[in-house]
Amino acid sequence: MSKNIFILNGPNLNLLGTREPGIYGAETLADIEKACAAHAKGHSLTIDFRQSNLEGELVDWIQEARTKADALLLNAGAYTHTSIAILDALRAVDKPIIEVHLSNIFRREDYRKHSYVSEAATGIISGFGSHGYILGIDAAAKLIK
């Protein structure tokens, strides 16, 4: 049976390709999803790729990952820097958690340099654009095999 990775995306990531392309790149979230599905297949993995602008919905999906995923990749967007609710949900997940950011959050505004997600993450990938998702799949594949 194939192992499954949840790939969850937070607020405003639905605007990729048009929102600040100088920071976030020209690829759309659909482009990233397609690349992730193809790459995961090469590891004999499946993905469940989702995006929400709603904090509570992300919390629900993180809780769902406890029983339906073998690993979790999370780009929580701005909730990375603000959401204790997401941190609490992540702390209940006993699976590898890979935190992903398109930009290098440590080279940006001071308020982006703190991540609540990091407190629960197995590892962090930051600053490699959409390729960070591919690196995250590679890391998750290694951790769950």
Image (cartoon, grey):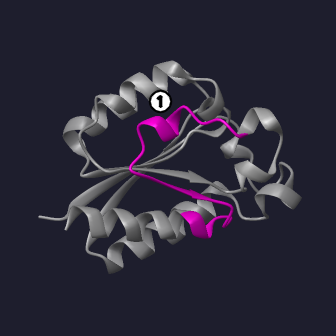
* Residue occupying the point 39% across, 66% down: 139
In the image, is 127 to the left or to the right of 108? left
* Residue occupying the point 57% across, 39% down: 76
Name the spot of residue 31 as percent of width and height, x first: 62, 65
Q: Secondary structure at mark 1?
A: helix
Question: Residues in magenta?
Answer: 113-132
Q: Residues within 10 Å of mark 1 (few under 14, many from 20)?
A: many
Relative to 19, say whether 133 is above or below.
below
Residue extending farthest left: 1
Viewport quadrant of the N terminus: bottom left
Does residue 138 belong to the magenta stretch? no
* Residue occupying the point 41% across, 37% down: 120
In the image, what residue type sits under mark 1? Answer: Leu
Viewport quadrant of the C terminus: bottom left
Give the image quarter of residue 12: top right
* Residue occupying the point 28% across, 28% down: 92
Q: Nearer the viewer, residue 39 or 115?
A: 115
- For disc 1, the marked residue is 58
Name the spot of residue 34 as percent of width and height, x first: 52, 67
Name the spot of residue 43 as percent of width and height, x first: 30, 76
In the image, is 15 to the left or to the right of 133? right
